Image (spheres, rainbow, N blue to C red):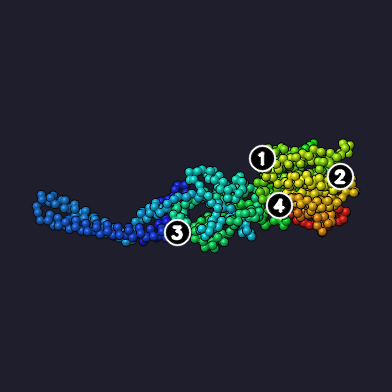
Amino acid sequence: MLSYKRISNKIFKFVKKDSMIDTTITIETSELKKHMQEHFSRNRIFDLLTGISAISGGGILGYNSWKALIDIMKVPLPWKIDYFTDILKGTVGAAMVILGMVACIYAVKRPSTSKIINAIVGTLYKTKEYTAIILMKTRVNGIPAILVRRQESWRSYFLPYCHFNPSDSEEAIIEGIKHELSHTLELPEHIFIVENPYNKNQFYRIKKNLSSGSVSLIQFRFYSVRLQNGINRIRFTKTHYSQFSWKSKTELSEDIGTMSNNGDVLSIIDEQSMIQKTPFTFSDDPLRLRETERSFRIIWTITNHCSYECSICATNSSCRTKCSLTFEQKQKILLNIASINQNIESLDISGGDPLLDPKDQELIRQCYHVLPFTNISITTTAAGLDRVPASDMSSTVKCCDITYDIPCQKYEQIDDVNRIKSRPYNYNKANLEKLIAIRESGLDLEINIHVPIHNETINFDDVQLLLEDIARVHPKSVKFIRLMPVGRLEPTEIPKEYAPKEFLGYVDRLMKEKHYDFSVSINCALKTEEKIFQDNVARCCPMLNEKLGIDSEGNVFACMWAAYLRGYNTVEDNPFYLGNLLKKPLYEIVRNPYLPIENLRKAYEKGCPVCCVSEKISDIRHP
């Protein structure tokens, strides 16, 4: 009897095409076995009946043949020709006997396979499907694992997949895979890098759909998918993709439902060593065993160009300065920031004004793709917002941090001779009007207000005017910032009577009385003050452990504001300097065992030069 293996080999020859390198056939359903048994029985009966008929017919004709031969011997020669027809019939009869015996033997030992093959391949499957199976790989506890999705209707795990048209080109199939992944994972198409490192093998399987009961012939191919630099595994798995999980080959092979429905697919993956051939999906996978232990909040000053020239500017930006880096150099900095993307809690893109230059706007849009799971905010001005085309606003600015620190009414109360010098009048006026216009337009934009505390505004009336104006904008939050002797502001320009704590006391009072719909917070420099909004504020500096700063040249500092301290001949002399992102990735910088921790501690011996704290702060730790 013909074995199932030999039948599979026959089917292999039937469906094999010249372009195939390897083909796998699996027949799993009871219907297929039933049809094979029916064909076995039908072929046996048919061949036996054929053999018996041939033997019977051959016997009759053979008898006539022998009788004719005997009669020929008894008559004269001229009459022998009359018996030629009988002789021919006898010969044919003898041949039929022989063929009948062969048919009987064939019916017993070798039933016909052609009908079985035709029945299995030609009639059993009702549809043809062409499927691209997607392999995405990462490490889980040091073990390679692939992305799968649980389908309860099949009671098994499935790799991500999509259907394709067999007439499509390879490029069209890859574009279809990107589109399907973009829809499923809610990520932009261009971040997917789809490859076929498996020699473009094609595979076949015959499978029954448990829900519809139909049987399909499925041709499938395997593709690997990588994500562009910055899309990291930790933040990927923390999103809402709860239906997906990472499973090792061992975990999948131990799942009964998966082996029953997709055991052949897993066998192919194993036999072809596909997991080993599949590149890691995420850019941070090679660094999985070298993670940092903390999450950072990063401020990146991408330019020092600004429409204004405020006397208190902490980054020393103005309309006369221009960033020396090219767009390509800034892109390199972005990619080197992404080397710790799994440890970036937030990224504030600042300036200067990062929205004045269209190229910087494009860089910001790239940040969303390179760091899609990082909270990205843009610190800008009304002048910068006016430079963004309306069609690009939602894709460029999703969270806007903007300053409003002196109420417009205060300018009108001061004579020209005594006009406030720290900010030009149109700075705050333009910012407020722009934010009100955005709210009235209905644009879905998160707004956060920054309020540097000026000595001129430390009184109850000004604080009340300020909060009333801010309330018109309906921001999400308001952060209060103390003046720091960095950038353009000289230490001597901060008066000794400067008392931000008094200002915050007025804020606390008004928040309790007015119940504004925004939250308030204070920057780290103010947290060194005792009993501000809370009873106990520890004098623990978050720099290097929670915060990092990057200036417009790509230099990394333990504290953003310390980047603009004066009195150092070179940037390397600054004790807060850590490295440059044009030379090495951020991961190597923050994990450098030779960080100048001792230099920082010495800089704090007499207090912090940035926060203006006179006491020693020694709680500076390696990240």
Task: State the CA–CA distance, disc 4 to disc 2.
Answer: 37 Å
Sequence-wise, which precedes: disc 1 or disc 3? 3
Against 233, is 329 above or below?
Answer: above
- Which comes before the other along the chain, label 4 or label 2? 4
Residue 339 appears in the figure: no
* Nearer to us in this view, 220 or 57: 220
Q: Distance between the residues labelled 1 and 3?
A: 54 Å
Residue 303 in percent (x, y) is at 75, 41
Residue at left offset 68%, top offset 37%? 389
Callout in the foreground (4, 2): 2
Q: Which of marks 2 and 3 is nearer the N terminus?
A: 3
- Extreme-front residue of the structure: 513
**Is residue 244 found left or right of 130 in the rendered image?**
right
Dot label at residue 28: 3
Q: Of the residues shown, which amino acid type is indicated by label 2?
A: Glu
Q: Residue 140: where, in percent of width, then height?
A: 63, 58
Q: How far is mark 1 from mark 4, CA to CA?
A: 25 Å
Q: In the drawing, what numbered circle is on residue 456? A: 2
Q: Mark 1 points at which residue?
A: 392
For label 4, the residue is 344
Neighbour tally class for label 3: few under 14, some 14-19, many 20 plus, Cα within 10 Å: some
